[in-house]
């Protein structure tokens, strides 16, 4: 029998990426332990922290009410993201106008709080994706790829939402959010040897019910958010369908909680976002476990799909 390698792949979604923590909570309760982590944007943040043994309760603690907190771990609130321009930025007007904020503050915060800031020294395989702005190509940071870049810099590059943040500079190259190229990079998990790939997707479109006001009547932000969710989810679905055909012996589990109605930038919705991720994760993963998806297999790359 061969021990299965399980991967966790997290999408972006800004504050909606908090649902990833709920999915990981479901993994813990079911005894499912990923050893490969892949992420873009919010998924990169979760992969880089939880993937190197920062306890889930410490990560969740940052979103509890101040008087209910039990830990002194990282607190990734809005203030950790919104940095002021440096003197170097001010001397380059074209670059200064390429985004509203600098993401350098987030990089410094992560460099201070991550237990390990070197991909080559991590206890598990962690991969972070970004997009090289000038070449237009996806860049993968992690073991076997670009692993000399500090983890904090890779995550900062991956979180660089176009327009909101100025492209993040590493050396002489500039990077944007990894989702600009791909919503989820499940292919990276496959290349790392995963037998089961858990995809946590925070872009599931809102499902309108008859007892609620139509999305079209809620204003432009709601319409644009729903349109983006549909577009990104369809792109993710096609990527996974292609991978499933190319690798029929690998199991892909799509965990997509119903959080399409939540704003990308409302961290005060942390509790419902985490709960929805947890409930959906528990349902999907428990069903997969009943089917024997997580049982050791006789073949090296698995036989269930």
Image (tube, rainbow, N blue to C red):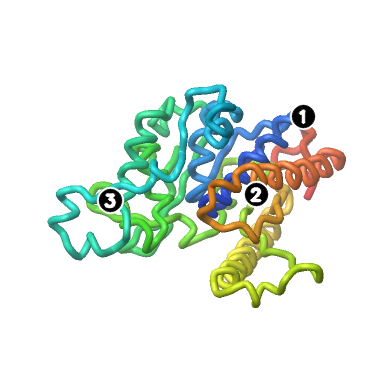
Q: Which residue is denoted by mark 2 in the rendering?
A: 199
Q: Position of residue 85 (x, y in %)?
A: 23, 51
Q: Residues within 10 Å of mark 3 (few under 14, many from 20)?
A: some
Q: Residues within 10 Å of mark 1 (few under 14, many from 20)?
A: few
Q: Earlier in the sequence, mark 2 or mark 3?
A: 3
User: Secondary structure beneath disc 2?
Assistant: strand
| Left or right of 158, for residue 196 | right
Q: Quadrant of the N terminus?
A: top right
Farthest right residue in view = 290
Q: CA distance from mark 1 to mark 2?
A: 25 Å
Q: CA distance from mark 1 to mark 3?
A: 46 Å
Q: Which residue is denoted by mark 1 in the rendering?
A: 1
Task: Kindly check if marks 1 and 2 are in contact, taking CB atoms under 8 A apart as contact.
Answer: no
Farthest bottom residue in view = 216
Q: Position of residue 82 (x, y in %)?
A: 35, 48
Q: Residue at 63% across / 46% down in the picture?
A: 19
Q: Residues within 10 Å of mark 2 (few under 14, many from 20)?
A: many
| Left or right of 214, for residue 171 | left
Q: Residue at 39% across / 62% down in the picture?
A: 162
Quarter occupied by residue 165: bottom left
User: Secondary structure beneath disc 3?
Assistant: strand
Q: CA distance from mark 2 to mark 3?
A: 29 Å
Quarter occupied by residue 166: bottom left
Q: Is residue 124 visible?
A: no
Q: Which residue is denoted by mark 3 in the rendering?
A: 169
Q: Position of residue 281 (x, y in %)?
A: 73, 44
Q: Earlier in the sequence, mark 1 or mark 2?
A: 1
């Amino acid at each position: 029998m061969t021990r299965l390698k399980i991967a966790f792949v997290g999408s972006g979604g800004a504050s909606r990426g908090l649902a990833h923590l709920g999915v990981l909570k479901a993994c813990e309760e079911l005894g499912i332990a990923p050893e490969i982590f892949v992420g873009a944007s919010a998924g990169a943040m979760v992969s880089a922290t939880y993937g190197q043994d920062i306890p889930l309760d410490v990560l969740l603690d940052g979103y509890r009410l101040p008087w209910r907190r039990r830990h002194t771990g990282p607190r990734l609130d809005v203030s950790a993201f919104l940095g002021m321009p440096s003197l170097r930025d001010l001397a380059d007007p074209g670059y200064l106008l390429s985004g509203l904020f600098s993401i350098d503050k987030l990089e410094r915060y992560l460099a201070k709080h991550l237990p390990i800031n070197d991909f080559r020294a991590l206890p598990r395989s962690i991969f972070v994706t970004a997009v090289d702005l000038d070449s237009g190509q996806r860049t993968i940071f992690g073991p076997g790829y670009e692993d000399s870049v500090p983890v904090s810099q890779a995550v900062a590059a991956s979180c660089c939402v176009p327009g909101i943040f100025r492209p993040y500079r590493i050396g002489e190259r500039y990077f944007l959010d990894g989702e600009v190229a791909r919503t989820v990079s499940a292919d990276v998990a496959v290349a790392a040897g995963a037998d089961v790939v858990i995809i946590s997707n925070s872009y599931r479109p809102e499902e309108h019910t008859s007892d609620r006001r139509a999305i079209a009547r809620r204003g432009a932000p709601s319409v644009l958010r729903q349109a983006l969710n549909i577009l990104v989810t369809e792109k993710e679905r096609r990527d996974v369908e292609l991978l499933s055909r190319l690798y029929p012996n690998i199991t892909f589990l799509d965990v997509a909680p119903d959080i399409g109605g939540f704003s990308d930038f409302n961290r005060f919705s942390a509790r419902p976002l985490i709960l929805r991720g947890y409930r959906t994760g528990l349902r999907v993963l428990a069903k997969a476990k009943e089917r024997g998806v997580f049982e050791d297999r006789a073949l090296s790359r698995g036989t269930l799909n």
